[in-house]
Structure formats: structure tokens, C-alpha cells
Amino acid sequence: MSLVTILTPTYNRVHTLPNLYNSLCTQSDNNFEWLIVDDGSTDETEELCKSFIEEASFIVKYIKKVNGGKHTALNIGTGKIDSTLTMIVDSDDELTSNAVEMIGLYYNKYKINQDIGCFSFLRCDKNGKAIVGLEKNEFIDSYIEYRIKKEHPGDMAEVFFTDILKRYPFPEFTGEKFLSEDVVWIEIGKKYKYCFINKPIYICEYLKGGLTANDKPMKFASPFGSMLRGKQLMSKECGIKTNIKGAIIYNCYKSNRASNLPDKLKIHSFREKFLIFITILLGRIYRSVWKKKN
């Protein structure tokens, strides 16, 4: 069994997948396998992946599903993984040649620490410039404390223990195809620590047609998922500043589908009800502004 599975959800990325494949072919450590979950692509993705399976010197697996959004592809993929670790790598990105080697190095160093649920490395651009930087070369902290309360946002390269990802699947809502991944990262962060490592192992490029570029329109098209993110940010652990932000987000998207809320979106505590009450107007203002911009 491989140490790590590179999990790649993809949708109509036949033109970028070869770059990721080539970066996997150059890995200094082959203790990995590649699982591609095709989220209903209409291009030649399936044929391309079959060619990868035939020629690769490492294990390549391919699953095709009905289009439902990245988070649904991740749920399908995670359920099929047997390796100890899982790293989500988007289909338009690449890995550095020492990525798997670095993952193995830090896994061996910290595997006896049962408080750690994730190794969080850096992402960089094509020129090697890190997307975010860390103050220390290596440290252990809570995702909520460091990334949210201490305000260190930005994309990083997370490598999770697979059994933890299996226990924290991405919530799914019928008819919705987008969910911010931090909905799950925050939930994991309530129980497990993150090991932050100041080394880039992930090369990313934000494409015009990618999820990042289409962030707001996709959030409005998936209001329940967007509301869930707001509710998650209202968690007491996240601090009052983030709680207010979460309440604004909740109100902003609630007006889209205010009736017949799923149970997981309903508000029960007085604290959350108060936060939502005092941010109703701000939520409507942000909704109006974001709608006009997008």
C-alpha cells in the first residue's frame, strides 16, 4: 500500500492534466498512487486517463461520475482510498519533484503524534514564489487559531490523514455544485492540530475558468453550501470577528433560499441567533454589492 494518494477531481481539464501527470512522473519518491475522479467531463478526459494508466510507472486509478461539483468528487474519491495520507491536487496544478519525498519525511517525523491531522505545506507559482509565507520553518498549531484567529489566509498544500477525511466528508445539498473546502477544514481543526511546514511542494496557476475565478457566482448558485460556511464561521472557536463575518455570509445567501432549510443550516443557539439578527442589514448590503459585481 502506498503512503500517499494524490487525489485529483477534474472537469474538462484534458489540456492541463498532462502537466500534473508529468510532474508525478518526475517524483524522487514513488511511494504514492494517483486517483483521478472525473466529475462528468465532456471532453477527452477519459481517454487521456486511460493512457496514463497504461504507461505510468506508478499506480493510476480513474473514476467517472455524474457532474456534481468538486466536493462531491472528493467524497467519492476519499471513500476509495486505502493509503495512510491523502493530498488533494487540482487538475490544473502540479507538484514539485520532491513533493512525495517531503511528505514522507515529515510523516515519519510526526506519525506518533496523534494530535496531528494534517501536514500543511506551501504552494508556489511557476516561478517558485510562495503564495503565502510562514514565520517559522516548522511548527504545530490549530488551523482555527493560526489560519483564522491569527489571520493567515491563503491557499496552502494540505496533506491529510485519510481516516480523518473519511470521518469528515463534505456536506452535499441537492442541486448544488459548490462548497468551500474550509467548511470541513474548520471542523477537522476543532479536534486535530496542523503541522505547518515552510516548504513549497505544490505549483499552482489560477486559470480564468477555474473555481477561484468563479468564486462568487458559484456561491450564489449554491446558497445552502454558502450558508453552511457562514454557520461554520460562527463557531465559538473561531472568535467574535470571524463570527460576525460568518453571520453576514449566512444572511447574504439566506435570502436566496430562505424557506425549507435543511436541519444542518437551522440556527438553534441564542448566540448565533443574536449574531444573525445584528447583521441582517449588512448581509443584504453585501448581497446587493456582490450581485452587481458578478
Image (tube, helix red, strand yellow):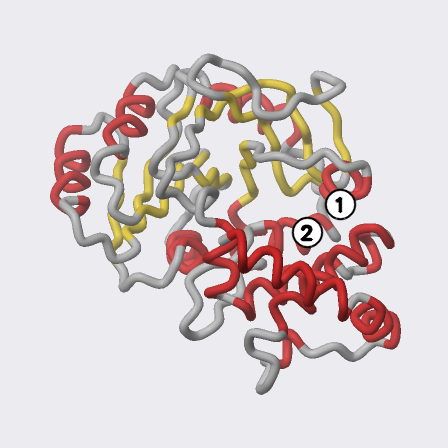
Using the image, tell me which numbered label, if any, was put on residue 144: 1
**Residue 240 picture location, percent across and down:** 87, 54
Residue type (three-letter) at the residue carrying disc 2: Ile
The mark that comes first in sequence, 1 or 2, is 1
Residue at (53% x, 65% y) in the render:
171
Left or right: where does residue 127 sit relative to residue 281? left
**Residue 40 picture location, percent across and down:** 25, 57
Residue type (three-letter) at the residue carrying disc 1: Ile
Neighbours of disc 2 within 10 Å: few (<14), some (14-19), many (20+): many
Left or right: where does residue 217 sit relative to residue 199? left
* Front one among 197 and 173: 173
Residue at (47% x, 43% y) in the render:
212
Contact flag, marks 1 and 2 (Cβ < 8 Å): yes
Residue closest to the far front: 292
Identify whether 138 is placed above or below 284.
above
Identify whether 253 is placed above or below 47.
below
Residue 169 appears in the rendering: no
Residue closest to the far bottom: 260
Q: In the rendered image, which quarter is residue 252 located in?
A: bottom right
Question: What residue is shown with label 2?
Answer: 186
Neighbours of disc 1 within 10 Å: few (<14), some (14-19), many (20+): many
Identify whether 79 is placed above or below 84.
below
* Front one among 76 and 30: 76
Identify whether 162 is placed above or below 100.
below
**Residue 250 picture location, percent across and down:** 68, 66
**Residue 128 picture location, percent across and down:** 49, 14
Using the image, tell me which numbered label, if any, was put on residue 209: none
Left or right: where does residue 3 sit relative to residue 241? left
Residue 57 appears in the rendering: yes
**Element type at mark 2:** helix
